[in-house]
Image: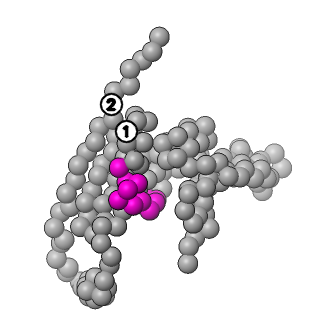
Amino acid sequence: MAFHHLALATRDLPATHRFYTEAMGFTLAKVVIGPTETPDGWARHVFYDTGGDGLMAFWELNDDTLPDFDPAISTGIGLPPWVNHVAFAATPDTLPACRDRWLDAGIDVAEVDHGFCISIYATDPNGVLVEWCCDTRPLDDDDRAAAERLLVDPAPAFDPPPNITFHEAPSRVATT
């Protein structure tokens, strides 16, 4: 079953909006404004159509009673950036365009060949790692059997390291 939407908090809605519309190519679909639990507090819930079967949403919180927070879903809680992340589906035809869109937006890209899929990664303005992932082969019964075995193995062997390519965005030239 597909998910309806994923909602995360943002500290900078204008930068978040630019990233998800310009760098990701998503479309602003809906904005809902509502009160928070305090009399003067309110929130803006912004939904983006991802072009797939779900929406991506962000909360802009305008409530002085809420604590200061780091919206990065991994580093904000002391984990490496790659742990918690958001992955979107790509195809062999769309993955290069996604990479080029990020590079054209001035965003450096890490490309990882995992053996069964190829992923590209960038970080959004909230410190959230975002991924476009393209399956390179279907998962089969052998993969499922290995998954069952590895799930309970107390000392599993490491997979071979993936092939990683870094794509540096072209330097932006200041215009006067």
Taking 68 as reference, is 143 left or right?
Answer: left
Color theme of the render: one colour
Does residue 152 appear in the picture of this structure?
Answer: no
Q: How far, Cα to Cα, is label 1 from label 2?
A: 7 Å
Which residue type carries mark 1? Leu
Q: Quadrant of the N terminus?
A: bottom right
Q: Name the residue: 35% across, 59% down.
A: 92
Mark 1 is surrounded, within 10 Å at the Cα level, by few (under 14), some (14 to 19) or many (20 or more) other residues, namely: some
Extreme front residue here? 93
Is 55 in the magenta?
no
Camera-nearest residue between 93 and 86: 93
Indicate the position of residue 87 as horizontal and vertical percent values.
44, 60
Q: Which residue is mark 1?
A: 103
Indicate the position of residue 117 as horizontal and vertical percent values.
31, 65
Extreme top residue here? 176
Camera-nearest residue between 140 and 40: 140
Indicate the position of residue 173 as horizontal and vertical percent values.
38, 20
Q: Which residue is mark 2?
A: 170
Taking 116 as reference, is 155 left or right?
Answer: left
Quadrant of the rendered structure where residue 5 is?
bottom right
SS class, disc 1: helix
Does residue 140 appear in the picture of this structure?
Answer: yes
Which residue type carries mark 2? Pro
Specify which label sits upstream in the sequence, 1 or 2.
Answer: 1
The stretch of residues the image draws in magenta is 82-96
The reply to whether dot 1 and dot 2 touch (C-beta < 8 Å) is yes
Q: Name the residue: 45% across, 15% down.
A: 175
Q: Is residue 115 above or below residue 37?
A: below
Mark 2 is surrounded, within 10 Å at the Cα level, by few (under 14), some (14 to 19) or many (20 or more) other residues, namely: few
SS class, disc 2: loop
User: Which label is found at residue 139?
Assistant: none
